[in-house]
Structures are given as C-alpha cells and as structure tokens.
Amino acid sequence: MEREEILYTKEHSWARIEDEETIAVGLSEFAVQELGEITYVELPSIGAEVSQMEVVGSVESIRGTMDVYSPVSGEIIEVNEMLQDNPSLLSEDPYGDGWIMIIRMSDPDELQRLMPPEEYENYLDAINSEIEEEEEM
C-alpha cells in the first residue's frame, strides 16, 4: 500500500480515498506503535452519521486507550469485523488489513483539511522533538 495515497489527522487517524465518495479509515503506524499490544477495538455502528473530527470508536491496549476520530463527515457504511476477533491486525498491518471503517463522505472538500504524508511526518518530528526536550529536563 502506497502511503502517498493516505491523508492524516493530528489525532493520528488516516483516510485513504477509495473512490469519489468513500474513504477507508484507520490509525497511523505511529499511533499503533504508541499503543503497544492492542487488546480491544470498539467499532462504530454501520449507518451512523458522523461529523469531521468526531470520536467514533476507541482502541484499547496494555498502555491505555486511544479515541478514533472520523477524518471526514459522512455515513459509516462498513466496519472491519475482523478486528473484533483479531485486534492485533491494527498493529500488524495498520494501512492494510488493520483498517477500521469505510465512510461515504457528505463533503469531500473536508479532505483538504487533512495532512498529506510529508506534512504528517513533519508533525510527528515536532511531537518527537517535544518528547525528547521533556525527557532532557
């Protein structure tokens, strides 16, 4: 899977454009590494109408819980049921089999508010720099 096709939120959700009206959504590799061993995924409901940056589910791990945010507004038309029995798919293949949901977008223009891969990498670098500075204090 080419990561260039993927857009990101500051909350570490990703959106991959599937076609003109749908996107797949998951958690970034950075997010799943921060979580460590994932033990449970709370999936959103099919048919739910969501707004951009609304919390739509959560992921639990030994280290804690992370909310999953919708990168766009729309209707959830599919969820990845495989995550119920095998939540570790999120860690093993975050941009492939570890997808969380498919959303039919109500406003594709919202994609312009998301970060392309290079911008997301710069964002992660800034986060890591802050962490390193805190550790040095």
Image (spheres, rainbow, N blue to C red):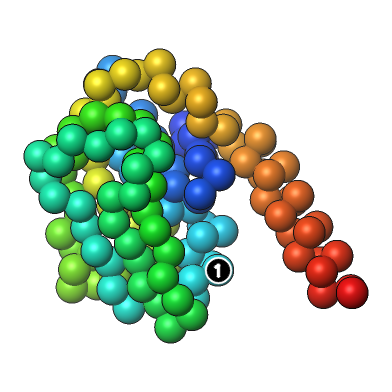
Q: Nearer the viewer, residue 116 or 50?
A: 50
Residue placed farthest to the left in the image?
Answer: 47
Q: Quadrant of the N terminus?
A: top left
Instruction: Look at 40% across and 16% down and name the residue there.
Output: 109
Snapshot quadrant of residue 134? bottom right
Q: Which amino acid does label 1 sit on?
A: Glu
Q: Looking at the image, can residue 96 be seen?
A: no
Horizontal side, residue 43 vs residue 14: left or right: left
Q: Looking at the image, can residue 81 be seen?
A: yes
Instruction: Look at 39% across and 58% down and name the residue there.
Output: 67
Residue placed farthest to the bottom in the image?
Answer: 62
Q: Dot 1: what SS?
A: helix
Horizontal side, residue 2 vs residue 47: left or right: right
- Give the image location of residue 56, x and y in percent: 28, 50
Instruction: Look at 85% across and 65% down and name the residue there.
Output: 133
Q: Mark 1 points at which residue?
A: 34
Q: Quadrant of the C terminus?
A: bottom right
- Give the image location of residue 22, x and y in percent: 25, 28
Snapshot quadrant of residue 121? top right
Residue placed farthest to the right in the image?
Answer: 137
Badge 1 local density, few (<14 within 10 Å), some, or many (20+)? few
- Give the image location of residue 98, x and y in percent: 33, 57
Q: Which of 100 and 135 is in front in this view?
A: 135
Q: How many marks?
A: 1
> Above or below — where is 47 with respect to 63?
above
Snapshot quadrant of residue 57? bottom left
> Above or below — where is 37 with respect to 74?
below
